Image (tube, rainbow, N blue to C red):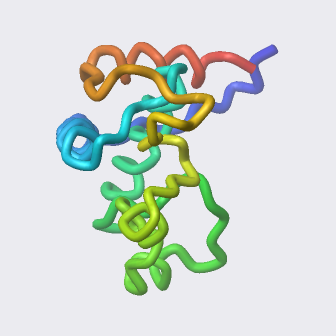
Amino acid sequence: MSNGYQPQQASDKNLEAMRKFAETYAKRTGTYFCVDLGTTAVVLEGLAKHKDDYGSPLCPCRHYDDKEAEVAAVYWNCPCVPMRERKECHCMLFLTPDNPFVGTAQEISFDQIRAETNRYSVSE
């Protein structure tokens, strides 16, 4: 049942920037996207939306009391410190080959992202 709420999508510009970043970063670090590309799409949308709203791709999978302060601290800006230091991605965007949820893709199209996020935003 729909409650009428649909989250605002990120701008095409920042979504495309985050898509390109994620593909390049996955290839450079030997990581892969989640086997469920819906997870990848939702995370990329969240990163792009934070880039729209705060100027930086703040991790969308965490709760922040003050997002602007977190952006300034840079710890949770993607790629976050745990990812850079230990290849630990809380969002499941960049997975190591030994992760049980790892897929084989290091690429995702803009249209795939929009299709997945549209599917999730109209449900419930």
Residue 73 locus on image (x, y percent): 42, 85
Q: With respect to residue 20, does 109 lie above or below?
A: above
Q: Which residue reaches farthest front?
A: 98
Seen at 36% across and 40% down, the residue is 31
> Relative to residue 37, is residue 40 depicted above or below?
below
Query: Measured from the top left, where is residue 3 in percent x and y?
Result: 76, 26
Which quadrant of the figure contains the N terminus? top right
Find residue 107 and report its image quarter. Answer: top left
Left or right: 2 as drawn, with respect to 19 = right
- Residue drawn at the location 29% of the way across and 41% of the way down: 30
Q: Quadrant of the C terminus?
A: top right
Q: Residue at x 53, y 42 (%)?
A: 92
Write down the quadrant of residue 83 in the picture: bottom left
Please state if 21 lies on the left or on the right of 2 as rendered. left
Counting from the top left corner in percent of width and height, residue 99 is at 57, 37
The location of residue 95, given as percent across then percent down, is 46, 40
- Specify whether residue 50 is in view: yes
Q: Residue at x 37, y 23 (%)?
A: 113
Total number of numbered discs in the rendering: 0
Quadrant of the rendered image containing residue 106? top left
The one of 13 and 58 positioned closer to us in this rendering: 58
Q: Is residue 53 visible from the viewing direction of this image?
A: no
